[in-house]
Every structure is written in C-alpha cells, then in structure tokens.
Image (cartoon, rainbow, N blue to C red):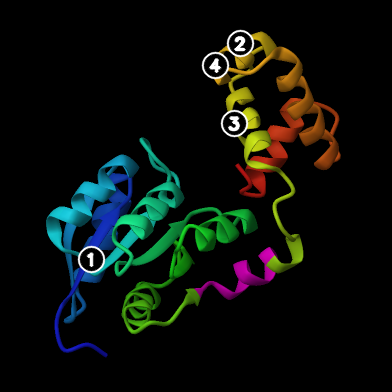
Amino acid sequence: MTSRTIRVLLAEDQSMVREALAALLGLEDDIEVVAQVARGDEVLAAAHAHDVDVALLDIEMPGATGIEAAARLHKELPALKLVVLTTFGRPGYLRSAMEAGADAFLVKDAPAAQLAEAVRKVLAGERVIDPTLAAAALAEGANPLTDREREVLRAAEDGSTNAELATALHLSQGTVRNYLSTAIQKLAVRNRAEAVRIAREKGWL
C-alpha cells in the first residue's frame, strides 16, 4: 500500500511486550520500528526526533497515558497517524482515544498481522477500530462525568480526605463534596470508592 518503509514509534512501558511488538512488526517488509519509549511523557520528543509516520501508543504508561500522549501528538504533529493499543477493552477508552485524535484503536492481543495491517490502513487515511469495542462503546453511551468530576475522582483514588483533595486541587471543601456527590449520583453508586471503581472500569477516568 506504500512505496516506502513506514517509520513507527512504539510507546509501551512493559519492556517484554514492547520488544515483542517491535520484533513482530520488524518482520514486515514495509514497516520499521525506528523509536521505542517506555513513558508517555517521552512520546512527543521521540516523534519529533525520529520523523515517524505512525505512533503506536499503549494506554497505561507512566508520565502520561497513551490518550494524553495522542492528544499532544495530534496537536503538534497533525499529519502523524496514531494507533492506540489497550490491554483492557473499556468502552470509555475508545471514545476518549477518538476524541484525542486517534486513527485506530486495537486490543494488544490482536494478531500481529492485524496490527501491521492497521498501520498500513491509517497511513492510507483509513480509521481502524476493534469491532467488539466499537459495539460496546455504542451500547455504553457517552461518559456522563464532567472534566472536573473526573479530575476530583482521579485525585480521590488514593483515599485522600476532602480537605486534602481541596488543597491539592485548589478548591474549597464544599466544592469537592459537590463534585464527588454529583459523580456518585450519576454513576448510581453508594460512595466515592465505588464511583472511582466504576468510572475506572468503564474507561472514564
């Protein structure tokens, strides 16, 4: 589908998985993994430094998530094609990835040939989405949480008190309580711990 080698950046924090993906993609005649990083906050610099065509981004990485990295790449290098990979088939991740500018969204246990074909397709201007995840995302609907509610829930994951959350987020304790209460109501759960768990499972955080 292309007359030249496709230059790929691979971002994955688990070294064994990263090396396996790089080795499998390296078997393709028209694909070369020219850069590998283990942190989300190293993605942008690597993309600039290595003149890549496609970035493969794992979601769960230290420094920044693959979705956050995708948003930065999409803003600074709009011609770069973005493929987001996930271990967890969470519908909310798919929606977030698409909003961040991803061209493809696949689960990591997909066959290597499917991943290679996705790289070629996105470079040709196509969008590639795992059909099972697409169906689940449609069934799940949109994320009901606002950006602020997500921010407070993420901060509450470590069990911080309302006072600690207020200090960390530069909000009043009353405002923190209101955000948590609204999130709990929207998710139809009993407490903040359940709200965090449900939102995380659905890929909404």
Disc nearest the viewer among 4 and 3 = 4
Q: Give the residues in magenta.
A: 129-137
- Dots 2 and 1: beta carbons under 8 Å? no
Q: Earlier in the sequence, mark 3 or mark 1?
A: 1
Residue drawn at 21 percent across, 78 percent down: 28
- Dots 2 and 4: beta carbons under 8 Å? yes
The percent position of residue 10, horizontal first and vertical second, equals: 27, 57
- Dots 3 and 2: beta carbons under 8 Å? no
The residue beneath circle 4 is 168
The numbered mark at residue 77 is none
The residue beneath circle 1 is 8
The percent position of residue 132, horizontal first and vertical second, equals: 62, 71
Crowd tier of the residue under label 2, counting other residues whose Cα lies within 10 Å: few below 14, some 14–19, many 20 or above? some
Crowd tier of the residue under label 3, counting other residues whose Cα lies within 10 Å: few below 14, some 14–19, many 20 or above? some
The numbered mark at residue 154 is 3
The residue beneath circle 2 is 164
In this rendering, the answer to whether 23 lies above or below 113 is above
Give the residue type at disc 1: Val
The alpha-carbon separation of the residues under discs 2 and 4 comes to: 6 Å
Give the residue type at disc 3: Arg
Give the residue type at disc 2: Glu
Image quadrant in which the C terminus is located = top right
The alpha-carbon separation of the residues under discs 3 and 2 comes to: 13 Å
Q: Earlier in the sequence, mark 3 or mark 2?
A: 3
Disc nearest the viewer among 2 and 1 = 2
Crowd tier of the residue under label 4, counting other residues whose Cα lies within 10 Å: few below 14, some 14–19, many 20 or above? few
> Secondary structure of the magenta portion, mostly?
helix
